[in-house]
Every structure is written in structure tokens, then in C-alpha cells.
Image (cartoon, rainbow, N blue to C red):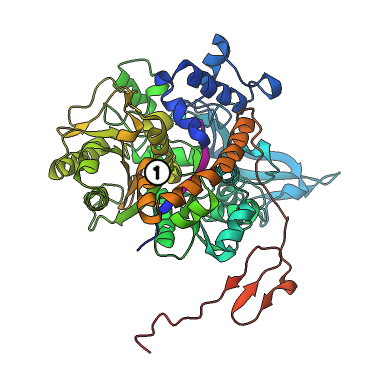
């Protein structure tokens, strides 16, 4: 018997806003919400964006403010808080020549050492020198357009680094702190209580970025410093590592001494980390697993790199797609006429518990992750091209769900969250996989969602966006349509697929399972199966009995109340980021060990040391 990884909390931030309590999901399906739900969603975003605070937060927005919220969320034209894509700074190298040579003055402290060949230097007063040379190699300040003008940006006015003492933190790590804080507080249970119940060594954290931290406070500044004439800081290299989202959350949000890891797999990074967490819980290595990713790729160098690959939707390509003026809000166009993907920034986190612990604590049940399947592509001609590995991951996930829930759940009560990157190659290859496998498993019209249409491609966090959206679908029943396209492209395979251009409403109890699909550069394919909460509760009742579920529901009342109190404060713009820098340090001199257990001062519960021989049949 394996333990079931139950999703007990989730949180994060992306271009749709705050993820906890389905706030970001509600922004995606805003046009299908009731008037009250629409007002609550827009009011929450207005507070997050700093447009209404304190007592002024809450309640309907006037027309101008509502439009400001709508315009400042989801995929849109790149804002100049990142850089001006029309006039982006760069250095133009030049070799200057003059018949009479060059004479100029400068500070003696600025002289290069050794002196360039052909320079003669005379000392002047006040620490200055006069330089004579026949030619001069220079880097001229200049500006040029970057041919990509759309991005999935955090809501305008929301700056994660302003909500805690984030000095010298790269933007990706700021996102990690805020996202993990959102998930932990949405749990509705004090984290110390979780640690005491699970045991400090029974908690796992798996999180990473795919591309590292590339802004000036991370690897970007590290690699640029010499050419910019700056010094490398003591923090840039360490904070630039891809493992830092997990490390920051362990140290400053959770204070965890449990298992940690950072798995990177290009665009499938989130599912790779989720797989490690699911395996920990299913086999009993952990009772709690925190899974996350954070990516902040909106820097000129990254955009230049993807643009040179021909991967991004550039301005010329979009003009051809739209036949003239560009609608930047519709730049990300999965399964429609498209010309490349749109980069986005974001962070997503979930907290998994084994089924027994979730019931004991009265934790919320938002669903469960049945499994995550990973397969490579085999021989490749191009490292960025898709391959056959994704057939294996999707088929394995579908087959196992059929074994768990039966034919009807798979054929009639499931949906797919497509990778849906919005490239011409993806629309053909991924739709072919879904269409062929739907036919093989007897599915007539498989609903397919593609949330990158709204959010862009958040790289490491992309499948986290899929997961959080799926939890919203389970709760509300609205499948987001691919609303950024007018029609499905002619080369898309969809004989057995339901690719809707409008939101589709279903009864929440009619959806049993979501499949999350990811296709990453290098042959990093992953597919996860996520079970709906009503399915999970049915499974828990069968395993633990109705009396146990009744007792659980009673414990859950107080938990729900505490979680709702956090949601109410967050909707006023009071996110209360958890950042415990230097707090609760463990005094190593106080660590006690008797050969069978270790006791850490200030950490609830002992760590029991392994005492059984795992290879007893061989010794």
C-alpha cells in the first residue's frame, strides 16, 4: 500500500496575480464569473497592484480603475520597468583612427594596467594625466530595438522585493520567498505544528529555477561585471544558483532541516521537482513535501538568446499573424496561427502531505498527485526539437489513471493542460500526441486547455501554472478557453480533441482528473496526473473509513477559518511575507545524540537514525 500525495496548500504569483484561493485562476476566467466573483477578483488584484490599500480595498471598482487592473495583468506589451525594448542599451565596439593621433586627459587612477601598446603618458597636476596615442579602441554607448515586445509580467505595480527586506536578492528569489509564503499561509495550520506532527526529517523541499538568477544581483551581474568595469559582489555567484529557490525557502521561510533538492529539466522543471516529491511521499521517505519553482527571465540577454533561436514571437512575426497592427495581449497563441512563444515570469508552490497526516491535521484537500512520468527523446538531431519521449509520458499517465479510476473517468471525466508553447512546431507535434493517444484510449473529444495563452511561458514555473489552474478548474468547473486565437490552425490534429476558443463550464464533480504535460528543450518530457478533490475524498473514505473522515471534517473547520483570515488580509494587500533571516538559529553545541536519535535545539521532534538493514537478504 502506497501513501497518497494529497495537495493541502498552494500559492504563488504570476501575470494573473496571487495563486492561493484560486485568485489567479479567477483572473483567467473572469468573463465567466458571477458579478460578485468578478468584483472580488478585481478588488484583490487592485490591492496587489497598490491601487487600493487599507480600508479602501474591497468592493466594486469604478470603470477607470477596473480597466487599469485589466490592462496591467496577463500577457501584454513589455513595460519599461524591465527595459525599453524599443531602445535597449548596448555597447558598440569601434576602432578610432586619426592622422594626427589622439590626445586626451583622464584621472591617473583610471589608467589601464598594463598600458595599451602605443600609449605615452605625461603626469599633470591633481592626479591627472595626458595620454597620446595613434589609435583608440572604444566601446560606444548605443541603443537598439529588441525585436520582442510582449511578455507575461507580474501585475503592474506589484514588486515582490518591496514586501520584505530583499536587499541584493535577485528577482527570482524574491518571487520564491513571496510564493512559498503564500502557500504556507494558505494552509491554515501553523508550520511549527506541521513539523511537530510529521517530524523534522520527514519534510522534503524540491524547488529550482531552470535558467538560474540572471538579473544584476545574480549571475547576470556576475558575468557582466568585468566588461562593465564593476567588481563582482560576494553574493552574485551564490544567489545565482538554480538551487537557490529551495535553499531560500528552507532557510528563511520554513526553517527546514529535512530533505532538499533542486531538479532542473528545462521547461519541465516543475514536474521534475514534483516527481521527486511524489516519490518521497508514496514510498514513505517523507510525510510532507513542498514543491516549487521561480523564474524571472525578463532580461535583455535571455530575450536576445531565445530570439536568435527563432523561438519567441517577435514583432515582425506578429505583424504577419495579425495582418497589420499587433495586439500584444494576444501574442501567445497556442494551437492557432502563431510565430513563437512569449516569455513570462512567475513562481508557484504546493504543499503535499501523505493522506494519513492530512487527515490528522485537518488540512485542506485540494486534490492529489497520482504520479509524474518522465521520459527522454532518444537520439536527437536538434537539442531544441521535440521527440517521441512525450508519447511515453502521456500514455503512461493515461494508462495508470485508467487503472486507478476506470475507463469512464479517463474517457469522459478528464482534461489535459497542454504545454501549448505557441510555436508552429509545438502546435503540430503536441496535438498529434494528444489526438493519437485519445483515439488509442477511446476518447472522442478530449478537453485541452493551454494557459500560456494568458500567462506566457514562465519556464521552470510553467507546469506550476498548469497545476494551479487545474485546482481552480476542480473547484469552479470552468475550463479556460484558448481565447487569444480566432481559429485553430489548419495543421493542428484534433479529430479526438476539444480545443475550445471560449471558456467551457462544467459541473466540478464531472471532472475527475487533469493531465499536466510539459515538453522541454533537450528531450525533457514529463506528464503528471492530478486527481480532483471529490475523487480524493472518496478514496480516503475507502481507505480510512467514514468515521475518520467525519473527525477530519471537524478538525478542518478551524483550519479553514485560519486560512480564510489570511486570504482576507492578502486581498487587502497585506501579504505578510515570511522572511526569517537569522531567526531561530540552531545552537550546534546543544545538539544531542545517543546513537539512536538526534535532538536539535529549537526544532520540534527528534530525528530517529536508521536502525534496520535495508539489505538484510544479502548480508
Q: Is residue 290 visible?
A: no
The image shows residue 149, relative to residue 259, as above or below, that is above
* Nearer to us in this view, 531 or 573: 531
The location of residue 601, given as percent across then percent down, is 71, 67
- Quickly name the residue at label 1: 463
The location of residue 513, given as percent across then percent down, is 31, 42
Badge 1: few (under 14), some or many (20 or more) residues near its Cα, within 10 Å? Answer: many
Q: Is residue 141 visible?
A: yes
The image shows residue 70, relative to residue 309, as above or below, that is above
Rendered-image quadrant of the C terminus = bottom left
Q: Main secondary structure of the magenta part?
A: strand
The location of residue 417, given as percent across then percent down, is 32, 38
* Nearer to us in this view, 148 or 450: 450
- Magenta stretch containing residue 206, yes or no? no
The location of residue 107, given as percent across then percent down, is 77, 44
* Nearer to us in this view, 154 or 435: 435
Magenta segment boundaries in residue numbering: 7-17
- Magenta stretch containing residue 10, yes or no? yes
Q: Which residue is most to the bottom? A: 619
Tag count: 1
Rendered-image quadrant of the N terminus = bottom left
Amino acid at each position: 500500500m502506497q501513501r497518497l500525495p494529497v495537495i493541502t496548500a498552494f500559492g504563488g504569483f504570476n501575470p494573473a496575480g496571487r495563486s492561493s484561493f484560486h485568485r489567479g485562476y479567477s483572473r483567467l476566467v473572469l468573463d465567466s464569473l458571477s458579478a460578485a466573483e468578478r468584483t472580488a477578483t478585481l478588488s484583490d488584484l487592485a490591492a496587489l497592484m497598490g491601487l487600493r490599500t487599507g480600508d479602501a480595498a474591497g468592493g466594486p471598482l469604478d470603470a477607470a480603475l477596473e480597466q487599469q487592473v485589466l490592462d496591467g495583468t496577463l500577457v501584454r506589451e513589455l513595460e519599461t520597468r524591465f527595459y525599453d525594448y524599443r531602445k535597449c542599451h548596448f555597447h558598440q565596439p569601434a576602432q578610432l583612427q586619426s592622422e594626427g593621433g589622439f590626445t586626451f586627459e583622464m584621472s591617473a587612477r583610471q589608467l589601464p594596467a598594463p598600458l595599451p601598446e602605443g600609449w605615452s603618458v605625461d603626469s599633470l597636476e591633481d592626479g591627472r594625466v595626458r595620454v597620446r596615442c595613434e589609435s583608440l579602441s572604444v566601446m560606444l554607448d548605443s541603443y537598439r530595438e529588441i525585436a520582442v515586445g510582449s511578455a507575461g509580467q507580474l501585475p503592474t505595480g506589484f514588486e515582490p522585493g518591496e514586501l520584505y527586506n530583499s536587499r541584493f536578492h535577485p528577482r527570482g528569489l524574491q518571487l520564491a520567498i513571496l510564493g512559498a509564503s503564500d502557500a504556507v499561509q494558505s494552509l491554515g495550520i501553523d508550520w511549527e505544528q506541521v513539523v511537530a506532527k510529521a517530524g523534522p526529517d520527514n519534510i522534503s523541499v524540491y524547488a529550482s529555477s531552470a535558467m538560474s538568477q540572471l538579473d544584476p544581483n545574480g549571475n547576470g551581474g556576475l558575468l557582466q561585471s568585468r566588461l562593465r568595469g564593476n567588481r563582482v559582489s560576494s553574493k552574485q555567484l551564490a544567489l545565482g544558483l538554480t538551487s537557490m529557490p529551495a535553499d531560500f525557502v528552507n532557510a528563511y521561510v520554513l526553517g527546514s532541516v529535512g530533505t532538499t533538492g533542486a531538479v532542473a529539466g528545462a521547461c519541465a522543471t516543475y514536474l521534475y521537482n514534483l516527481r521527486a516529491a511524489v516519490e518521497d511521499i508514496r514510498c514513505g521517505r517523507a510525510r510532507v513535501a513542498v514543491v516549487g519553482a521561480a523564474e524571472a527571465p525578463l532580461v535583455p540577454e535571455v530575450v536576445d538568446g531565445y530570439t536568435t533561436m527563432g523561438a519567441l514571437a517577435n514583432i515582425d512575426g506578429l505583424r504577419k499573424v495579425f495582418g497589420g497592427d499587433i495586439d500584444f495581449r494576444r501574442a501567445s497563441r497556442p494551437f492557432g496561427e502563431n510565430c513563437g512563444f512569449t516569455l513570462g515570469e512567475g513562481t508557484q508552490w504546493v504543499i503535499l502531505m501523505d493522506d494519513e497526516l492530512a487527515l490528522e491535521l485537518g488540512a485542506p484537500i485540494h486534490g492529489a498527485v497520482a504520479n509524474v512520468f518522465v521520459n527522454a527523446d532518444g537520439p536527437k538531431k536538434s537539442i531544441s526539437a521535440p521527440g517521441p519521449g512525450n508519447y511515453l509520458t502521456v500514455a503512461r499517465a493515461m494508462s495508470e489513471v485508467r487503472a486507478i479510476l476506470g475507463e469512464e473517468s479517463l474517457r469522459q471525466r478528464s482534461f489535459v493542460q497542454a504545454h501549448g508553447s505557441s510555436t508552429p512546431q509545438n502546435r503540430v507535434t503536441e496535438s498529434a500526441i494528444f489526438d493519437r493517444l485519445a483515439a488509442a484510449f477511446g476518447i472522442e473529444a478530449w478537453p485541452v486547455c493551454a494557459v500560456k495563452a494568458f500567462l506566457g511561458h514562465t519556464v521552470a514555473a510553467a507546469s506550476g501554472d498548469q497545476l494551479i489552474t487545474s485546482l481552480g478548474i476542480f473547484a469552479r468547473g470552468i475550463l479556460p478557453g484558448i481565447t487569444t486565437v480566432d481559429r485553430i490552425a489548419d495543421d493542428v490534429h484534433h479529430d479526438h480533441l476539444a480545443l475550445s476558443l471560449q471558456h467551457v463550464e462544467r459541473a466540478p464533480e464531472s471532472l475527475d482528473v487533469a493531465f499536466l504535460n510539459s515538453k522541454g528543450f533537450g528531450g525533457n518530457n514529463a506528464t503528471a496526473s492530478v486527481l480532483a478533490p471529490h475523487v480524493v475524498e472518496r478514496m480516503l473514505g475507502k481507505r480510512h473509513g467514514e468515521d475518520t473522515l467525519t473527525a477530519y471534517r471537524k478538525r478542518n473547520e478551524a483550519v479553514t477559518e485560519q486560512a480564510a483570515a489570511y486570504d482576507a488580509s492578502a486581498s487587502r494587500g497585506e501579504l505578510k511575507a515570511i522572511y526569517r533571516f537569522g531567526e531561530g538559529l540552531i545552537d550546534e553545541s546543544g545538539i544531542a545524540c545517543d546513537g539512536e536519535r538526534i535532538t536539535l535545539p529549537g526544532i520540534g521532534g527528534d530525528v530517529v537514525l536508521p536502525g534496520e538493514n535495508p539489505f538484510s537478504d544479502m548480508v
